[in-house]
Amino acid sequence: MTSSFSANFIVYLCEKVIMVKIWDPTLRGSELRATLKGHTKTVRAISSDRGKVVSGSDDQSVIVWDKQTSQLLEELKGHDGQVSCVRMLSGERVLTAAHDGTVKMWDVRTDTCVATVGRCSSAVLCMEYDDSTGILAAGGRDAVANIWDIRAGRQMHKLLGHTKWIRSIRMVGDTVITGSDDWTARMWSVSRGTCDAVLACHAGPILCVEYLMSDRGIITGSTDGLLRFWENEEAFDKLLEMGLKACMLNTSSLGTVVLDGSIHERCLVSYDLLDRGV
């Protein structure tokens, strides 16, 4: 299950579902705006901007949709494995990562893969890109976080330390944050390629990590059913105990966290950090 958020829209998909739903929370009573159908297998990743939605699927394809009309604009094919990550970029570009171990850059205008910008030794499960610096970070089943400078065309670092799959990765400035099945999250320096902190306070795999700009802290979500807020390398607060897997986090500058979670039910939960309440 994953989601993408932008200006009055929530683009949302659920595990084992081959469609994408677009919701507008401002439309009371009729929030569902569109259902996008085109994939033939489970949709694993979505990304959106003001005009387009991009989705990646187990059918090894990436589809670009018009957000307003729900029209299928392009179908990008080139991966040899399940597509696990997609990211809309400026200039009509899309980044994708897949279980074939590659990260690819696409030009939506020409419907072509312009470059394979990263290669990993196993399936890529998560990626992050800084469009201002050209730094790409990706992690996956080999427990390695790879850092590339794609503008210079070189790999900067292989970050070693996790012992199991890396499920989530975030990058803020010179810091990369990773979450792993080894029950830990780690903070790394992009420039030095070193591990600056190990965050260990969960009792299960960490499926999502997020940097909270308003508090300059880190939030982690785990299969142990907990969200934790970290400050100065310590678990400052147990934000939420819900009895569900925290599968995805998205934060706003106002201190609101939107959580995707599921064990028995699919749900979206909005959590206000200022009030510490749902």
Image: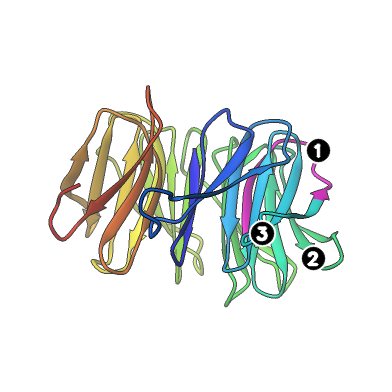
Side (left or right) of 131 relative to 167: right
Q: First in sequence: mark 1 or mark 2?
A: 1
Q: First in sequence: mark 2 or mark 3?
A: 3
Colouring scheme applied when the structure was drawn: rainbow
Q: Which image quadrant for residue 84?
A: top right
User: x%, y% of residue 108?
Assistant: 78, 64
Q: 267 above or below 176?
A: above
User: x%, y% of residue 255?
Assistant: 25, 63
In the orientation shown, which residue stands out farthest toward the top? 264
Q: Secondary structure at mark 1?
A: loop
Q: Amino acid at mark 2?
A: Asp
Contact? badges 1 and 2 (CB < 8 Å): no
Q: Which span is picked out in magenta? A: 76-87
Q: Residue at x 59, y 76 (%)?
A: 133
Q: Amino acid at mark 3?
A: Thr
| Residue placed under numbered mark 2 in the picture | 107
| In this rendering, the label closer to the viewer, 1 or 2 | 2
| Residue placed under numbered mark 1 in the picture | 80
Packing grade of label 1 (10 A; few <14, some 14-19, many >=20) is: some
Q: Residue at x 80, y 50 (%)?
A: 75
